[in-house]
Image (spheres, helix red, strand yellow):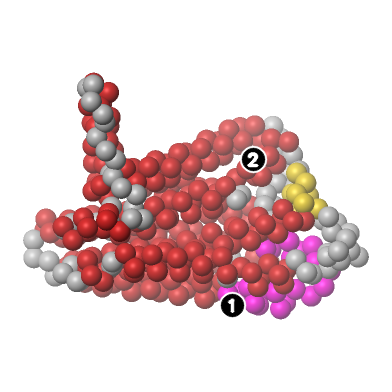
Amino acid sequence: MANLTTVKEFLLLGFGNLHGLQFFLFGIFLGMYVVTLLGNLLILIIISLDRNLQTPMYFFLSNFSFLEIWYTTSIAPKMLQTLLVGPKVISFVGCVVQFYFFGSMAVAECFLLAAMSYDRYLAICSPLQYPSLMNLHACVLLASGSWLGGFLTPVVTVAMTFQLPFCATYKIDHFFCDLAPVLKLACSDTEIVEKTTFLLASFVTMVPFVLTVASYIHIVAAVLRIPSAAGKRRAFSTCSSHLTVVTLYYGTLGTVYAIPAATRAAVLNKIFSLFYTVVTPMVNPIVYSLRNKDVQKAVRRLMSHWASAKGSSGPPPPPGSIFFLRTAWASVKDTKH
């Protein structure tokens, strides 16, 4: 038996023997990872440069895109390595760090999605009070609370998991250091760790989920009271992208955790994990690009400005101020939601 002081590294088995498919899958997942990075970087750049997007809604979206970059980066590079070269050694500290940051980003995403739904609730249900209620202080408080909650929540689980004594084999049958495959290596009873993790996970997922659902119930009720069809479409268009992302995220989590981990085959667990670590983060920026007319208009405006600047001898039009500055929020009062 080996304890915490003697464990030096783990071996990530990845996807096992793929019979020649590893290079094909490597190309697919690498492409998906690149799309995720570029898509979220594009959203961050557009929001920071376009003055019309200096609003609370896009402040939260910029936080969400930044989170998605780190969320998928905590998993994808090591996963790609296991596809390219086979089972890959990861140090004990590296496994702890990967486990912690993945859990942190997942929790922070739940809280951020709830904050974004609350923003849409205020914008549609209380449009006159919206500029005063969703001011800079409120936005920073909600965003920082989401990040802080994300970074603090996994600490207990990480501490309890990696102080367990591990058996002689350190082979993790997964492509990253996830909770279930790591606990399988423990030589002691893991019931306390599993119950504690279940309680924490239930709280940090169900509370934001309930708040998100409650917000959209009120939003739908408010929209249905709008007399004109055009008004209803306009109101729904302001939250359709976020609602799509919420459905994808919680739909994936629900599918993954509806089947108890103990009854899932290792290969099935890996396939499920791919959805919420690789597929969903790639889809999110595409949704916000294709379904969000404001972002599309901002792209066209920036392209027009750059084309005009390139064709003239004068300096290019000045970019919008960075969204963290208070002066950027002056446009919120003039924005119709």
Vertically, is 278 above or below 302?
below
- Give the residue type at disc 1: Leu
Q: Residue at x 26, y 41 (%)?
A: 298
What residue did someone put label 2 on?
80
Please give left or right for residue 148 compared with residue 93 in the image: left
- Give the residue type at disc 2: Leu
What residue did someone put label 1 on?
199
The image quadrant of residue 220 is bottom left
How many labels sit on residues? 2
For the residue pair 136 and 194, the one nearer the viewer reads as 136
Asked if the residues shown at circle 2 and circle 1 are in contact, with their CB atoms under 8 angstroms apart, the answer is no
Q: Residue at x 65, y 65 (%)?
A: 261
* Residue 274 percent across, percent down from the top left: 57, 50
Please give left or right for residue 86 compared with residue 167 in the image: left
Indicate the secondary structure of the residue bearing disc 2. Answer: helix
Vertically, is 50 above or below 96?
above
Q: Is residue 237 visible?
A: yes
Question: From which residue to which does the magenta span run?
Answer: 178-200
The quadrant of the rendering that contains the N terminus is: bottom right
The quadrant of the rendering that contains the C terminus is: bottom left
Q: Earlier in the sequence, mark 2 or mark 1?
A: 2
Q: Residue at x 75, y 73 (%)?
A: 190
Furthest-right residue in this view: 1
Q: Is residue 186 magenta?
A: yes
Query: What secondary structure prevails in the magenta region?
Result: helix
Indicate the secondary structure of the residue bearing disc 1. Answer: helix
For the residue pair 60 and 311, the one nearer the viewer reads as 311
* Residue 43 percent across, percent down from the top left: 37, 45
Q: Is residue 38 magenta?
A: no
State the CA–CA distance, disc 2 to disc 1.
32 Å
Please give left or right for residue 322 compared with residue 34 in the image: left
